[in-house]
Amino acid sequence: MSSKPYKIWFNGQFVSWDQAQVHVLTHTLHYGLAVFEGIRAYKCDDSRSAVFRLQDHIDRLYASAHIAEIKIPFTKEQALEATLELLQINELVEAYIRPIAYIGGGKIGLHPGDNPIELVIAAYPWGTYLGEGALSKGITAKISSFTRMGVNSFMTKAKITGNYANSVKAKLEATSIGFDEAILLDNEGYVAEGTGENIFIVRRGILKTPPLTSVLEGITRDTVLKIAKDEGIEVEAERFTRDELYIADEAFFTGTAAEITPIREVDGRLIGTGQPGPVTKKLQSRFFNIVEGRDQKFIDWLEFFDTASPLKVKNESL
Ligand code: PMP
């Protein structure tokens, strides 16, 4: 990982980017049991930025940890405060934030015993996830040959690192043959989600998204459902098939990294006109108004922080 001029919050202390290292015998590195989050902060004006739905992301981190039986040795309040402090210390006005709670070194057998649980939070600038033009023109996707993991083997309500081996393989498969993203089907062959995104279609004026069985309970998914309700758009959380996706009028991905990304083509078939449709554009524009603090109705989703007066590190370990 190339060096960056940002501090990382490491178990309660701010350390330099290069110092935030783990040992090769870290339990999580071998068995893939850690829980993490992806969060974004947006610039609202010249003196303020805001983290979008920070409390909901922290709640999901601790819910994932509860499912994974990882006891995070910090409270939710401490994690929330640490995130805001980290952004200010790094003088970040827009950022992607990555908290991770993992099982540290000690016993290397499968049973983690009393190995320490480490909590780390990193933050750094990160632009459009799916490439330039993705938000305005849309992206191409391929139905993956990989299946979304069965709900009793991988618990999809939890953002567990090991679950993402499946996503990484699907992503590599799709991109290696020229697609931007993969869409995974569930065990029964219904559309589930992208590698790191929930999926929506619009057909005959109805907005549809798969129910929360084999997909992550996306915070952007929930945001879109609430915006749609507010806009009077009819919504169904219902399973749909890949061919229904092919004949949808519009389709888009949602995710903290992907934001609201139109899907213009799936498996070589244009979706609708092949241009982002009116419902997608309306939801996308409302979404950016909300996250950038221009929409009073959903202002409670924003955790504002001051960007005009930088903070200094108090408990630095260098
Ligand atoms: N599904 C998966 C598998 C994901 O990794 C993500 C990203 N966290 C999402 C959906 C979207 O979730 P959110 O909107 O909370 O980022």
Image (cartoon, rainbow, N blue to C red):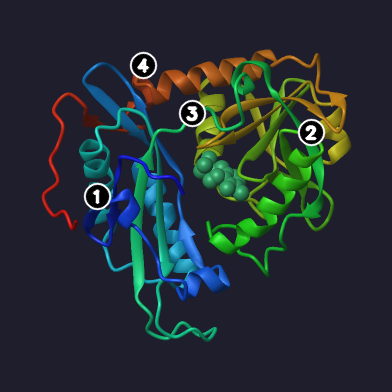
10 Å crowding of disc 2: few (<14), some (14-19), many (20+): few
Marks 2 and 1: which is nearer the front? 2
Label 3 or label 4, whichever lies nearer to me, is: 3
* Residue named by callout 1: 82
- Name the residue located 14 percent from the left edge and 46 percent from the top edge: 313
The amino acid sitting under disc 2 is Gly
Query: Which tag, 2 or 4, sits closer to the chain's start?
Result: 2
**Residue pointed to by mark 2:** 178
Whichever of labels 1 and 4 marks the residue nearer the N terminus, that label is 1
Image-quadrant location for residue 259? top right
Q: Nearer the viewer, residue 7 or 155?
A: 7
Report if the beta carbon of the residue with label 2 is closer than 8 angstroms to ligand 1. Answer: no
Residue under label 4, please give it: 294
| Disc 1 + disc 4, Cβ < 8 Å | no
Q: Which quadrant does the C terminus fall into?
A: bottom left
Is residue 169 or residue 141 the one in the foreground? 169
| SS assignment at label 3 | loop
Kindly state the secondary structure of the residue where label 4 is placed.
loop
User: Do we see residue 218 in this rendering?
Assistant: no
Mark positioned earlier in the residue sequence (2 or 3): 3
Image quarter for ligand 1 equals top right
